[in-house]
Amino acid sequence: MSAALLSTHGLKAFYGDFQALFGIDFEVAPGEVVALIGANGAGKSTFLKSVMGVIRVAPEMVLLDGQPTGGAASHHMVAKGVGIVPEGRRLFTGMSVEDNLRVAIDHSAGGNDTWSLGRVYELFPILEEKRRDLVQSLSGGQQQMVSIGRALLNQPRVLLCDEISLGLAPKVINEIYAAIPSISAAGTAIVLVEQDVGLAKKASDRLYCMLEGKVTLTGKSADISREDISAAYFGAGHAVA
Amino acid sequence: MQWLDGFIQGILLGGLYAQYALGMALMFGVMRIVNISHGDLMILLALIGVSLSVSFGLGPFVLLLVLVPIAAAIGYVLQRGILNRVVSQDPLPSIIATFGLSIALQNAMQQIWSADTRSIPGGGIEQASWQIGTIFIGVLPVIVLIVATALTGGIDALLRFTKFGRALRASAADVEAAALTGVNPQAVYAWATALAVGILGFAAVFQGLRSTVAPSDGPAQLIYAFEAVIIGGMGSIWGAFLGSMVLGVSQAIGFRINPGFGILAGHLVFLAVLAFRPQGIFGRS
Ligand SMILES: Nc1ncnc2c1ncn2[C@@H]1O[C@H](COP(=O)(O)OP(=O)(O)O)[C@@H](O)[C@H]1O
Ligand SMILES: [Mg+2]
C-alpha cells in the first residue's frame, strides 16, 4: 500500500444531487499501467475529473504520495505531477500544434525533465511535420497525439488517459498504443480509461472494472478471465458476451 | 485637399480609438468577456487624471506613470472580484454584472465630479502642430497614434510569443483544458484584465488632453471600442487597430461631408461591415 503513488479512498462524486461515484478505492504505483474499464456512463471520466479537481471532493479521498490532495485545483494537481489526456482531446483551437505543446512546457511539474519537444516529436514524428499547423486542421489521430504530447510535456509522474482510442481507426489506435510502453519505461505511471476491453487488458498490468459508479472487479490483467470481466462490465444479470 | 486632410485627421483620431479598442480586443475579442463598463472605466480614469493633475500639478507624462498602474490595479480587482465569478460559456452574466457596474460608475462620477465637462491641462502640447501646405498636423494626435501603434505591437507580440500570451489564448479556447494543462485561468484572466484596463489609463490621459470628458461620456466610447473590434475581426489585435482607423477615417470624412454626419458615418460603416463581412476584416469566417 505504501508504494502507491496515487490512490483514492471511498471516493464519492456528485453532479448536483446526482451521485455518480459510490466509494471508489483505487491505487497506482510508479511505472505501473492500470486500466479502468466500464461501459458508457459507468463513471470513468467522473473518476478522473474528481482526481484532477474538476469535480471537488473531500481532501482525504485522493492521496498523492500519501498526502491528501482531494479538491485541489486542476493546475495544482498538474504542478504536483498528475497529467491528463482529457476525454475528447480538448486541444486549444486557434493555436498551432507547437503552441499547444508549449502551454504544457510553460506549466510543467517541477523536478522532472523526462519529456522535451524533441522526444515528443520522436514518439509522434507526424507532429513535427505539422508543428506550425492549427490543431483543428489535424486528423483525429493526430489530434490525439497532440493531446498525449501535451500531457507528457507537463512532466507527469502519473498520466491519466481518458479513452484515447475513441473514434480512431484500428491502425491509428495501434500507433498510439505503441507509445504506451516507452512512456511507462520512463517511470511514469499510467491510468488507461477504456471502453475497449481487449485493448485495455493487453496494455495494462492491472485493471479495475466499473459499473454504475462502483468498482465491480479488480486484479492482474493477465489473470482475469473474459467471463469475469463481462459479468463485472455489464452487471451480474447479463449474459456473458 | 480637404479629403486628404480628412483622411489624415481620421487616421490620427483612429489612434485614440485604438487605445479604447485594444483593451476591448483583449477582453471581448480574445477572452469573450463583454465589459459594458469599458467606456465608463476610461472616463473614471480620465476624471481621476483631471483631479490629480489639478491637485498636484502633474504634467501629462508623470500623470501617465501614475494613472496606468492605478488603471491596471482597477482591472485586476474587477476581474478577481467580479468577472472571474461570472465568466462562463454564457456571456449573459458578465453583461448583466458590468451593465450594473456601468450605471453605478456613472452615478458615482456625477456625485464626485458633477456633470461638467473637464479636460487635463497639457501645458501647451495640446495646441502644438506642424503645418504641411494647408494641412495642420497636431503634435499630440501624432503622439497618440505612435503610442497606440506601440501598444498594439506590444500586446500582439505578448499574445503570440510569451508564456502569458499562450496561457491566455489557451484559457480563452478551453478554460477547463487549460487548467488541466497546468494553467491557472483565473490568475491569467486577472492579469489580462489588468492589462486591458491599464491600456485604458493611456486612453484616459490622451482623451483628457485631446478633448473633454464628462461622467456620461462612457457609453459612446464603449460603442467605438466595440465597433473597432468587430470591424477588425474578433481575436485579432492588429484587426482592432485597423478597425479603429476605419472608424476614425469614416468619421473624419463624414464630418467633412456634413458636420452633423461625422459620428453617424462611422456607425454606418460599422453596419456595412456587419452586413457584408460579419467576421471582420482580419477575422476567419
Ligand atoms: N456534467 C454532468 N452533469 C450531470 N451528470 C453527468 C455529467 N457528466 C456525467 N454525468 C453522469 O455521470 C455518470 C457517469 O458519467 P461519466 O463519468 O461521463 O461516464 P463514463 O466516462 O464512464 O462514460 C453518467 O450517468 C452521466 O450521465
Ligand atoms: Mg467518459
Image (spheres, rainbow, N blue to C red):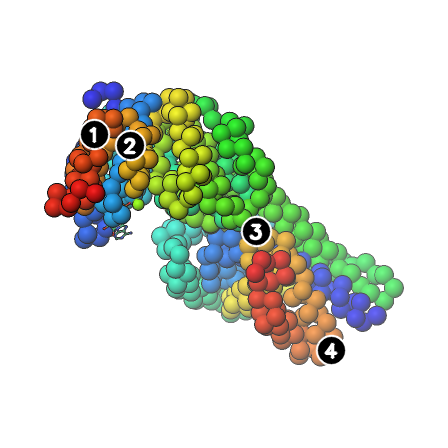
Name the amino acid type tagged 4: Ile
Horizontal placement of A56 versus B264: left or right?
Answer: left
Q: Which residue in the structure is indicated by mark 1?
A: A224
Q: Is mark 1 within 8 Å of ligand 1?
A: no
Q: Is residue A109 visible?
A: no
* Residue A201 tag number: 2
At horizontal 39% and vertical 29% (from top left) the residue drawn is: A180
Name the amino acid type tagged 3: Ile
Q: Say whether mark 4 and mark 3 are on the same chain.
A: yes
Circle 3 chain: B
Toward which corner of the image does residue A231 lie, by quadrant?
top left
Toward which corner of the image does residue A34 lie, by quadrant?
top left
Residue that lies at the very extreme toward the left in this rendered image: A237
CA gap, disc 1 to disc 3? Answer: 63 Å
CA gap, disc 1 to disc 2? Answer: 9 Å
Name the amino acid type tagged 1: Ile
Horizontal placement of A18 versus A182: left or right?
Answer: left
Q: Which comes sooner in the sequence, label 3 or label 4?
A: 3
Image vertical order of residue B200 relative to residue B111, above or below: above
Q: Say whether mark 2 and mark 4 are on the same chain.
A: no
Q: Say whether mark 3 and mark 1 are on the same chain.
A: no
* Residue B257 tag number: 4
Q: Say whether mark 2 and mark 1 are on the same chain.
A: yes
Circle 2 chain: A
| Place of residue B235 in the rendered image (x, y in percent of width and height, measured from the top left) | 55, 54
Do the residues under discs 3 and 2 have CB atoms within 8 angstroms?
no
CA gap, disc 4 to disc 2? Answer: 77 Å
Q: Nearer the viewer, residue B33 or B259?
A: B33
Circle 1 chain: A
The label nearer to you, 4 versus 1, is: 1
